[in-house]
Image (cartoon, helix red, strand yellow):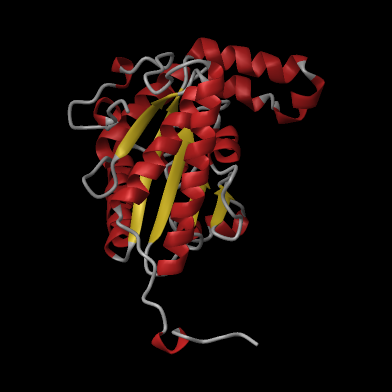
C-alpha cells in the first residue's frame, strides 16, 4: 500500500505541492480497483462493529473541500457496506438564527460521535473560519483566535476518547469546472447547482490560500490533516477507505469480555 506520509500536513506543507490529479492508491485495472474498494468497505463494517461492541471510543471523520470535491460521493461509497446504526452523518450548512445566537463551535459539539460510533462531518467547524476569512467578515487576529480554539476543541475530543481523522478533498480548478458544467447539463444533477457556486469559484485562489493556512495552522499530532488528491473519484474513495481502515486497525479494537454466566447456557 502507498504511504500516507506525503499527504499528511506538516509544518512546511504547501498545498500546491500536491497534484489533485495524481492517484498513487489506484492499482490494477478498474475491476480490481472496484474489488479492492468493496473489500475495504466490508472490513470497515467489521471494524465498526468492533468499535460499537467495545463501546468506549469514537471516531470522527471530517471532510472538507471546495464545491464538487466529492464529500457526498465519498460518504456514499466508503460506507457502502457499513450498518447505518453505527455511522452518523452531519452536513454543515450556513448557520441558522439559533446557531448564530451561540458561539460558532456550539453546533459542532452537539453532533460529536457517541461512544462506539463513527461520525462523519460533511463540511465542519472549519467553514466558520474559511468562509468568513475569504469574504472579509473577520480579520487575521480573529482567524488566529479561531484556529487556536479549534485546536483546543479537537484536543478535548481526543482526550475524551475520540480519534479525529481530517481529510481535505483536493480538486483542480479544471476538474471543478467540468463537474459544475455537468450539474448544469445533466437534468438529474441540475438540482445540485446553485448560482452562488459560480461566485465562490471566482474566489478560487483566495480559498486555496485560506485552505493552506487552515491546514498548516491546525494539523497536529493528535488531529492531523491529510490532503486527498480527488480529481479521480475512485482514487479519492480508495485513499480515504484505506486511511480509515488503517486508523481503526491501529486502535486495536477488541470485543468486551463475555459474561461468565453465559458459559454452557442453552436456549430452550
Rendered location of residue 191, percent (x, y):
76, 30
The quarter of the displayed image where residue 183 is located: top right
Question: In the rendered view, would you say 63 is above or below 125?
Answer: above
The quadrant of the picture occupied by the N terminus is top left
Residue at the farthest left position: 11
**Disc count in the image?**
0
Q: Position of residue 106 (x, y in %)?
A: 46, 60
Determine the residue located farthest toward the top in the rendered image: 174
Reply above or below: 15 against 111.
above
Residue 48 horizontal/vertical position (percent): 47, 55
Residue at 60%, 39% in the rendered image = 76
Quick check: can you spot residue 39? yes
Q: From the viewer's perspective, is 52 left or right of 157?
A: right
Q: Quadrant of residue 207?
A: top left
The answer to whether residue 122 is visible is no
Please give left or right for residue 185 compared with residue 196 in the image: right
Vertical arrangement, residue 178 with respect to residue 234, above or below? above
Relative placement, left or right, of 233 versus 167 is right
Residue located at (29% from left, 30% from top): 4
Residue at 42% in and 61% down: 51
Give the residue drawn at x 37%, y 69%: 56
Amino acid at each position: 500500500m502507498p504511504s500516507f506520509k506525503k499527504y499528511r500536513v506538516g509544518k512546511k506543507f504547501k498545498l500546491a505541492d500536491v497534484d489533485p490529479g495524481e492517484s498513487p492508491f489506484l492499482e490494477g485495472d478498474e475491476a480490481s480497483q472496484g474489488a479492492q474498494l468493496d473489500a475495504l468497505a466490508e472490513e470497515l463494517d467489521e471494524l465498526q462493529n468492533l468499535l460499537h461492541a467495545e463501546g468506549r471510543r469514537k471516531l470522527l471523520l471530517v471532510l472538507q473541500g471546495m464545491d464538487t470535491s466529492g464529500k457526498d460521493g465519498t460518504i456514499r461509497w466508503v460506507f457502502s457496506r457499513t450498518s447505518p446504526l453505527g455511522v452518523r452523518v452531519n452536513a454543515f450548512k450556513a448557520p441558522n438564527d439559533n446557531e448564530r445566537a451561540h458561539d460558532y463551535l456550539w453546533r459542532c459539539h452537539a453532533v460529536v460521535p457517541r461512544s462506539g460510533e463513527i461520525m462523519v462531518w460533511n463540511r465542519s467547524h472549519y467553514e466558520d473560519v474559511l468562509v468568513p476569512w475569504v469574504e472579509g467578515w473577520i480579520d487575521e487576529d480573529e482567524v488566529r483566535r479561531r484556529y487556536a480554539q479549534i485546536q483546543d476543541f479537537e484536543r478535548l475530543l481526543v482526550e475524551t476518547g475520540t480519534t479525529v481523522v481530517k481529510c481535505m478533498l483536493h480538486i483542480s480548478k479544471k476538474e471543478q469546472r467540468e463537474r459544475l458544467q455537468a450539474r448544469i447539463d445533466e437534468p438529474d444533477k441540475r438540482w445540485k447547482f446553485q448560482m452562488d457556486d459560480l461566485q465562490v469559484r471566482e474566489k478560487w485562489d483566495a480559498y486555496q490560500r485560506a485552505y493552506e493556512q487552515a491546514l498548516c495552522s491546525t494539523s497536529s499530532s493528535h488531529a492531523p490533516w491529510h490532503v486527498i488528491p480527488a480529481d479521480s473519484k475512485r482514487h479519492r474513495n480508495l485513499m480515504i477507505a484505506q486511511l480509515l481502515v488503517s486508523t481503526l486497525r491501529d486502535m486495536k479494537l477488541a470485543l468486551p469480555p463475555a459474561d461468565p454466566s453465559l458459559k454452557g447456557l442453552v436456549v430452550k
